[in-house]
Image (cartoon, grey):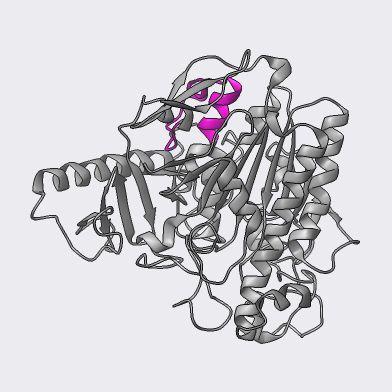
Amino acid sequence: MRNIFQSNINTPFFIFIATGLFFLPGLYSQSQSPNIILIMTDDQGWGDTGYNGHPHLKTPNLDAMVSNGIEFTRFYAASAVCSPTRGSVITGRHPMRYGICYANCGHILQEEVTMAEMVKDEGYTTGHFGKWHLGTLTRSDLDANRGGRPENDKHYSPPWENGFDECFVTESKVPTWDPMVTPPIQSGGVNKSQVEGGYYGTAYWKGPGEKACDNLGGDDSRVIMDRVIPFIDRAVEKEKPFLSVIWFHTPHLPVLTGQEYRDMYSSLSEDEQHYYGCISAMDDQVGRLRNHLRELGIEKNTVLFFTSDNGPEGKSSDEGRTRGRTKGLSGRKRSLHEGGIRVPGIMEWPGQVEPGKVDFPCFTSDYFPTIAGIIGIDIGKFNRPYDGQNLIEMLAGTNTERYLAFRIEDQAAIIRDRYKIYSDDNGGTFSLYDLLEDPGEEKDLSKEKDELFSNLVSSWEKWKLSQERSATGADY
């Protein structure tokens, strides 16, 4: 027996036994409320880290996080594209419950209780930095994919109207280098109406009608972190706990990076240099953040999470700028096969978490109830169904029987333990896979394990009814 969570007065205490992590109740006092940082990248594949065995990519800071924290080896994005997954983080609920069916579809409804709103009631200061993609940010200016267009006025739902005190956000994607400037077309993510060297068309917004105008050149991840660090400093100076949501654009198209990062991969092709270089640049900023927490002396009172919003873009890992890897998993972005939804997952909490691996499935919807549990909030008071569960309780060996339900366009899936059912005709016909024996989802076991299969299909149908009921507004 060894401890994977160390105990302090008024803090949670966890122990690790061969079968998993266990939790003995006990919550932080109000004066010791832990800081929360949620980092998410954009289109980073499960295989796109050094610690997961990538043959070229250098991510020493993510590797250090894993060495110092928990690696979730079967961590999932709640959807196969960005906006729905981001909605799951903010609410703990599948986004089709409230109309976010795909990228550029729907928005966070005011009736939803967001993570920022939840923690503000406990005295937290809140900040959102980077990509938003959960609604438009302006009604007056043409901006990004939907902003400023009359037909999208109903989708105005910026982070500052959803509980965030400080913001530095874009509606959607920007280039990963010089984010305000249209890059060469070979960078990807550039359309025919955009002029190379001109304004890309997506602004960084700080509040209603307020665009950022300075310090917008070079590496986009550095541009974002330049706003995160002062936010943290102000919170520490005011002795307030903080929630910082950091959603990097890297490595979403347009993909490019500076020469210093290209030089790290000089033996590879130009496209590989840009793709790997922009991830290494992002990794540098993760290191900068971790070092700053230590310089401030708050690392032991800060819970740091890292993940990606879905699997890698493109048809494969060997063409164009979409070089993301799934490490042999089937499918990529937009697919509910493993390669489209299994993503990097790390939790670091120095002084509380010792190094270890968690092999049971969990996903981005779990962040909301986990943070609520750490702080001591009963989400039952919000009186609505949640798709996520408190990871702390799961690590403690309680509430381990669970289903991870997925739905996007015509695809449906449920994961329970090692098994998964998948459908590409909206649940009409499912296949069953054993993900431990068959991570590539090649062998259908539905006829061999008919009782298990029927149970999983019934679970999907029950979840679908709940999701569709929520979509009518019944939860409000």
Q: Position of residue 365 (x, y in %)?
A: 48, 41
Residue 431 figure quarter: bottom left
Picture quadrant where residue 271 is located: bottom right
Residue 297 is situated, as x and y percent measured from the top left of the image, at 79, 32
- Residue 428 relative to residue 116: left or right: left
Vertical placement of 183 versus 279: above or below? below
Q: Quadrant of the N terminus?
A: top left
For the record, the magenta segment spans 368-389
How far from the left and from the top, in percent, is residue 41? 61, 57
Q: Is residue 239 left or right of residue 351?
A: right
What residue occupies the far right of the structure in this picture?
A: 214
Q: Is residue 191 visible?
A: no
> How many discs mark residues in the rendered view?
0
Q: Position of residue 270 (x, y in %)?
A: 64, 85
Q: Where 324 falls versus 411 (above or below)?
A: below
| Nearer-the-camera pick, 284 or 457 | 284
Whether residue 378 appears in this view of the structure is yes
Left or right position of 468 against 374: left
| Nearer to me, 120 or 99 | 120
Please give the name of the residue rendered at 43% of the width and 57% of the height, measured from the top-left corner. 341
Q: Does the magenta segment cover residue 379?
A: yes
Could you say which quadrant of the image residue 340 lies in? bottom left
Q: Nearer the viewer, residue 36 or 144?
A: 36
Residue drawn at (76%, 51%) of the image: 288
The residue shown at (74%, 28%) is 241
